[in-house]
Image: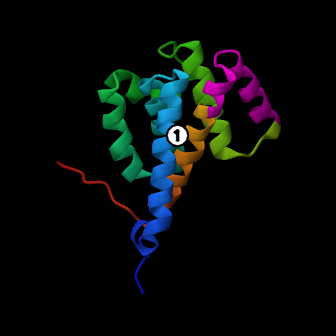
Amino acid sequence: MGVPQLDRAQREVYKQLVRTAVASREASGEAGLEESLLELVNVRVSQLNGCAACLATHVPAARKAGVSQDRLDLLPAWREIDAFGDPERAALRLAETLTRLDDAEERAAATAAAADHFSDEQLSALEWTIVLINAFNRVSIASHHQPGIED
């Protein structure tokens, strides 16, 4: 028995997940969140989850959205360097705590810190982005999706 490809085995379920992601991206744009911020969050969450297929999609998308390669290279050390602004730091902190889900106090503090930089509508859209990239990471990992890597 092979590994089920979740995106193919129950296609309609996966299509609904994609539709939700499209709606989330539209809501993020309407809320005024920058594409570069959303892609930084997508990359960081995918790094935390070890999702190679999602990284292969979102790293180039981040570059296309204007995130420099230097900032992408240093993203795992975002807390230690000055290359990320306060709103980015707040979003990345929120992304990490909503991905790990291991510390309720940190999650509350991260949400409060993010609320200092984002409106309620933006914060909600950002949280949807985080929830959905986590879902896509899990679909790709469970399905053993492999990125197309060129040498």
* Residues drawn in magenta: 105-124
Relative height, residue 51 to residue 83 (above, below): below
Residue drawn at 33 percent across, 46 percent down: 56
Other-residue count near label 1 (Cα within 10 Å), few / some / many at <14 / 14–19 / ≥20: some
Q: Residue 68 placed where, x, y %?
A: 34, 21
Residue extending furthest right?
105
Q: Looking at numbered disc 1 in the image, what kind of residue is underneath it?
A: Ser
- Relative placement, left or right, of 52 versus 135 is left
Does the magenta-highlighted stretch encompass residue 116? Answer: yes
* Identity of the residue drawn at 33% across and 59% down: 146
Mark 1, secondary structure of its residue: helix
Query: Which image quadrant: the N terminus?
Result: bottom left
Per the image, is 143 magenta?
no
> Is 28 placed left or right of 109 in the picture?
left
Residue 142 visible in the shown view: no
Q: Is residue 25 above or below residue 79?
A: below
Q: Main secondary structure of the magenta part?
A: helix
Q: Nearer the viewer, residue 151 or 106?
A: 106
Q: Quadrant of residue 39?
A: top left
- Percent of width and height locating residue 65: 34, 26
Residue of label 1: 24
Q: Residue at x 52, y 30 (%)?
A: 28
Nearer to the camera, 61 or 103:
61
